[in-house]
Amino acid sequence: MTSLPLVFDAPRRGLPPRHLADLTADERRAAVAELGEKPFRANQLSNHYFARLTADPAAMTDIPAATRDRLADSLLPPLLTVVRHVTCDDGSTRKTLWKAHDGTLLESVLMRYPDRVTLCVSSQAGCGMACPFCATGQGGLQRNLSTAEIVDQVRAAAATLRDGELGDPGRLSNIVFMGMGEPLANFGRVLAAVHRICDPAPDGFGISQRSVTVSTVGLVPGIRKLTEEGLQVRLAVSLHTPDDELRDTLVPVNTRWKVAEVLDAARGYADRTGRRVSIEYALIRDINDQPWRADLLGKLLHKHLGQFAHVNVIPLNPTPGSKWDASPKPVEREFVRRVKEQGVECTVRDTRGQEIAAACGQLAAEG
Ligand code: SF4
């Protein structure tokens, strides 16, 4: 088996203190018992956090005040504070910039569609993958986010919707790990976050695994590890071009794992889960939008993934001052037509957040 790269699960440097949402249900009970409290207090805390969506100890009035303070000190450290919200798309998209306990900045984007509400979460602050067309990639990786920092983005969004702060009161239905960072480079914490997101209340938020998408630029050992977990989450692979020569520059991690290896790993995931894999393709003018690349993409996907491939073409969201731009619409249409001609499903993303400059090439995209 391939050994894991160094980027996996870097040390806890800079991470916040332990939080309730970092822990499994058993660990929560053990942590409460260590504080000299009855284990059922863990269930009460979990019920407040995961079912009632509150992280404010003062609102947990069914727990005696002294106990509440002790539990809160140890298990509910403040994690994220809002720096600002930016809303666009007639109020149906809201990006939130968060500040963590150490001043680290991260963001999440909440998108309301007629049939679903999707939250795009960050799994790292910054990103170490250095894709040249992406603003986040230019700043490098600041640090991994803790499980609870990922989970708290979800709790806050679910509370926002319930309280009607983004239109009529609603329910968060989908989560995409397509914000800042490469989720599989923070594997253990992302996996734990998926469990918190999907476990039934009060141990988690009870969102269906099938409504969660984990994206990757193609960390093959990470895809294999995820496969072994036997979950039902959707896998999204940011391919962006079918040929290694260009991909080595567009997605630098390709110098380590080539296109064919990535697609084979994705096939392994599809075989295990029975789920289609989303192939993300940020279409960039005169870079990766040529007809021959569309043909090659269709052929490769047909060969490696067959009916398990679904290409999502994402019109590039240009970052200010960048030389990268979106392809013209006729070029985009021809690209999609050619991929489909090879028998592979291909659609163009409804890109949200264009006017609020969603930073990452993957941000505001959804499977
Ligand atoms: S596109 Fe995604 S993986 Fe690439 S640098 Fe940006 S955040 Fe990282």
Image (spheres, rainbow, N blue to C red):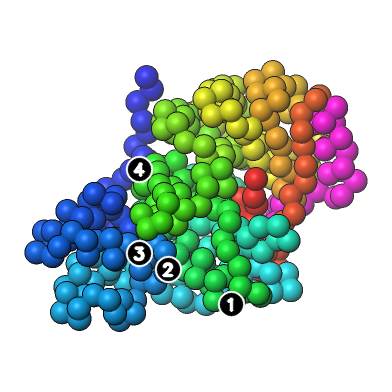
Q: Point out which mark residue 188 bears.
A: 4
Residue 47, label in figure: 3
Residue wearing tag 2 = 53
Separation of disc 4 and disc 2 at Cα? 24 Å
* Residue 186 horizontal side relative to residue 262, left or right: left
Q: Is residue 49 above or below residue 167?
A: above
Compare residues 8 and 96 and report the one nearer the observer.
96
The answer to whether one can see residue 105 in this image is: no
Do the CB atoms of the residues marked 4 and 2 lie less than 8 Å apart? Answer: no
Name which of mark 2 and mark 1 comes first in the sequence. 2
Q: Rate crowding at label 4 as few (under 14), some (14 to 19) or many (20 or more) other CA atoms within 10 Å.
A: some
Q: CA distance from mark 2 to mark 3?
A: 8 Å
- Look at 80% across and 48% down and name the residue there: 327
Give the magenta range.
316-341
Mark 4 or mark 1, which has the lower sequence index? 1
- Disc 1 is placed on an element classified as loop
> Residue 176, how many percent across, how many down?
56, 51
Residue 22, quarter of picture: bottom left
Cα separation between marks 4 and 3: 24 Å
* Secondary structure found at label 4: helix
Residue depicted at x 20% and y 55%: 29
**Residue type at the position of mark 4:** Gly
